[in-house]
Structures are given as C-alpha cells and as structure tokens.
Amino acid sequence: MHHLITTAIDYTNGSPHIGHAYEKVLTDAISRWRVLRGELGLRFMTGVDQHGQKVQQSAQRQGLAPSEYVAQITQQFIDLWKLLGVDYDIWAATTDPCHVKCVQDILQKLWDEGHFYKAKQTGHYSVRQEQFVTDKERLPDGTFGAEWGEVVEIEEENYYFKLAAHRDWLLALIDKREREGRPFVLPAFRNAELRNAVEKMTGDLCISRPKSRLEWGIEIPFDRDYVTYVWFDALTNYISFAGYDPAVGCTGDFAELWPAVHVIGKDILVPPHGIYWPVMLHACGFTDEQMPTLLVHGWWNIAGEKMSKSLGNIVDPVELANTYGVDATRYYLLADIATGRDADFSNDRLVTRYNSELANSLGNLLNRTLNRAKRYRESILRKPATSPLVEYVTQKCTEFAMRMDAYEVHLAIEAANAIAARANAYVEETAPWKLAKDEASTEKLDEVLYSLAETLRILSVLMDSIIPQAATAMRGQLAWDADLAWSTTAWGGLPDNHRLADPIPVFPRIEFSSEP
C-alpha cells in the first residue's frame, strides 16, 4: 500500500492556472477518498519548485532577489489551494534547508559511487527550456521552434549522470510491472508511450550548471563552482520531504510512506518522471518494489488547443472559484474530464453541469426532502424496517468505490449522480404529497421520508471527496455529524426519531451567462 500521494511541484515562474488547479483538486479528491476508506496513515504532499535560471531572470527583471520573487509566487499557490479546499499534509518548497541537505547528500553519495562524470559540451542551448538542443529539434528551415525561445551557441563544462547505463533495467521494470497487473504508469495506455521513449534513450543527463551562469540553485557539494540542475533538485522533493536520509536508505518512518503515487501531467511523463526519476532512485539503491506509481492526467484545452499565455486563453482558477463558487469549480474539474485524457474547458458546461447535476438533482432532492419532512412530520423521521432504495443505493456505492479505487473519478461521480436521480424518481413514484392526505398511508409516508433522508446522508459521504464544503453543509442540513468512514455508507445510519434541521439551499442555481 502506498501511504504517500504527491502532485508534481509547481514551478514558481508564473501564476497558477487551471491545469495546476485540476491536478491539486484531483489529488485532493483521491487523498480524501483513501482516508475515508480507512488509510489513516496516508500523507498528501504538494509544493513548489523555486530554483532555476528562468526564476533568476524573472527576479532580475523585477528588481527583486530570487528569494523575494519566489516568495510572492509561492503565496499565490498557497492561497489558491486554501481557496479550493486542497487539504495537503506536507508542503514541499525546494529552498527548504531539509531539502537542500538531502539533495546534497544524494549528490555526494552518487559522486562517491561513480555515477557522475565531468565533460565539456559545445552546442545550441535553449535559454527558455534551460537545456541543450540537438539537430533533431530543428525545423525544416534550420531554425528552432518558438517553444525553445532564445537559442544560443555555448561551450560549457558540466557534470553528467550515467543515465544510459540504466536503460535495460528500466525497460525490464516497465515490463515486469505490466505483467504483474500493476503498471508503472496509469492509465495503462501510457506505458507504451513510456516504453517507446526508453527504447530510444541514448546519452547521459547533464545535472549541473556553472555558477557563472546560474547562482540560484543548490550548490553541488563536491564542486562549489556549480549548482545542481532541476533534475536532482525538483524531482528529489518526493523523498526529501518524506524524510529520506541517503545515509540509511529506505528505512524507518520514510519506509512507512514509500513508495508513493505521483500525480503528474502528461507533459512531464517523458522524460523527467518516467525516465530520469526512476533511474535516479535506482542509482540511489531503491529496489524494483520501491519504485513509485505514476498517475498521469491529461490537459484542459480551449477549443482543442492547449492553454498558453501566448494564445491568451489561460483560465484563472481564482477568478473561476470567485465567480461560480468552490463547489461548482471542483465539481466541474473532476466530473467533466476522464482521468488521463484531455478535455475542452467551457464556462457554459461548468454552469450547465452544476445546475443540472447539483442544483436541480442533488440540491432539489435535499430541499424537497427537508421541506416535506418539516411539513408532514415536523422534521422527525421514523425508521422503517426496510426500504425499496436499499439495494440500488448499496449497488451504486460499491460502484463508486470501485471507480475511485481505480482513479476513475468522473465515473465515480456518475455513480453518485445515479443515486440522486433514482431518489428523485422515487419521489415522483410515491408522491408523498398524496400519502400525507391519506391516514392509511402513514407508515408508507414515514418510509419514503426516511428513505430519502438516508439516501442523502449516504450521498453526503460519497461526495465529501469531491465537494467537501457542500457535503459538510448537506450533513448540517441532515443534522448528522458522525465521524466519516466508508462504513457510514451502510444503510440505516439515521436513527429512529432523528430530527432534521430546517432547510437552507446548499446548491443555489447559477445564473446562466453564455461565453463571449
């Protein structure tokens, strides 16, 4: 069992966008779900990558020290996660002294063991991507694409990690994990993409930058004229903040958390997380069983195009949450995209899905149940021996759990929505407003009102991973405040003579405003 779930740390060279928000909300939902299932030792880690040449240059342009610049950007991320209800346990910031020490200890260990060498390289260097580019990246006219930014020719001596020596091991690991039914990369279709990249892998990995060009980084312990480049800095956060000590390896408290599940975007699967990271761990002495699992999500696009500053189509998650609410934002991000695939972002779809599935279905079910219970029974429930909804609700709870365990969050939401739809249909079938007028139907009316309230209680437990703020409000309306656990989805949690609270709308409709 993996007791550590992490997101990729966010680079502090720009404000957060909807892609950052989706990744964190997705991981938060998975984390909350696993705790609900009883994994009390689970820890959710996220954070920020604060070093690098682009950060140094941005700080210089603003007349700030790099530390001041990254502090400002870091606060934007922290504020956003608080706004969206992202409840992480471990905050990883790469300027933290504990991280710096761990990185330097790893570098020294690998240097002592012969995993690095020093060599001179002459070639074309992308200032934007902070890496050398080869002729393979040239366009037909001989130039380099806009994604590389300014490309200059330099000659530079650096330290290299013997990456290619681990190629066959990595291929064997990918195949072994696939045979065992626990792919290294999820969704499983991503394994073929990774395997193809590993087969083509040649050459070694530059892991340093001279201080004459880049000062804003972690100093290499065996050569103070260099700082380590992003790979042995940003990637190492997954173990440094979990308590890894290179001197003792994967033991003690760290061993209780590791191996982790890393939730990452598809753009950083190859090469950093799918190639560099497992090879770095392997060189450090991590076994095959101690390799993490990579859960790879897709992109939110606009009209089929990737969001980018240059196209001016970036969606601001702060503006989104402030306009539509946190629940609507979280719900849309989790419900409208299949984990691992891409999706087109649409304000219209956000509003439509919220109004249809939350306001009109779940919210309407809550309001009509509480109002009728208050009108017909002074909000007091009578617990029946059974209910016609028990079997269906139980079946859909099982489906919800199966989907969440498989990281298919959108399909889990569909299962929860099906419960709400069935309960609304049950209202129409039983017509409690008619039962209330018939003295002979007293027990049936009690059965209906209890069945609806109990279904809502169970839905509040299921939806706690998706929209925790609204789920908490639902439980307040139901006057049910028991500790949450998967066992509380069993039918019958509301006791006989339970008194419901007065109805207050939890899911007010959003006024529709078409996109320009």
Image: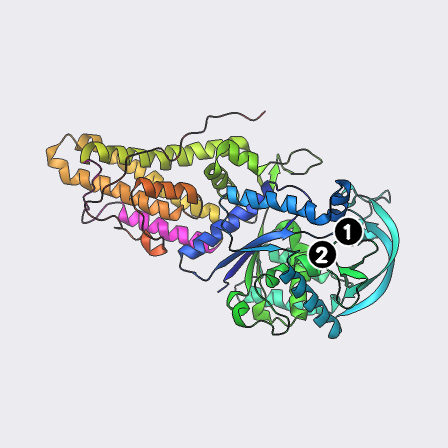
Please tell me which residue lies in front, 244 or 426.
244
Residue designated by label 1: 130
Image check: 304 left or right of 82?
Answer: right
In 3D space, how far apart are the residues under numbered discs 2 and 1 (Cα atoms)? 9 Å
Residue designated by label 2: 230
Above or below — where is 83 with respect to 223?
above
Residue at the image point whose x is 81% and y is 57% from the top: 211
- Part of the protein shown in magenta: 378-406
Residue 205: horizontal and vertical position, in percent?
76, 62
Where on the picture, by quarter, is residue 231? bottom right
Above or below — where is 122 with respect to 381?
below
Q: Secondary structure at mark 2?
A: loop
Q: Are marks 2 and 1 in contact (CB under 8 Å)?
A: yes
Image check: 1 left or right of 497?
Answer: right
Above or below — where is 476 with respect to 135?
above
Please tell me which residue lies in front, 251 or 433.
251
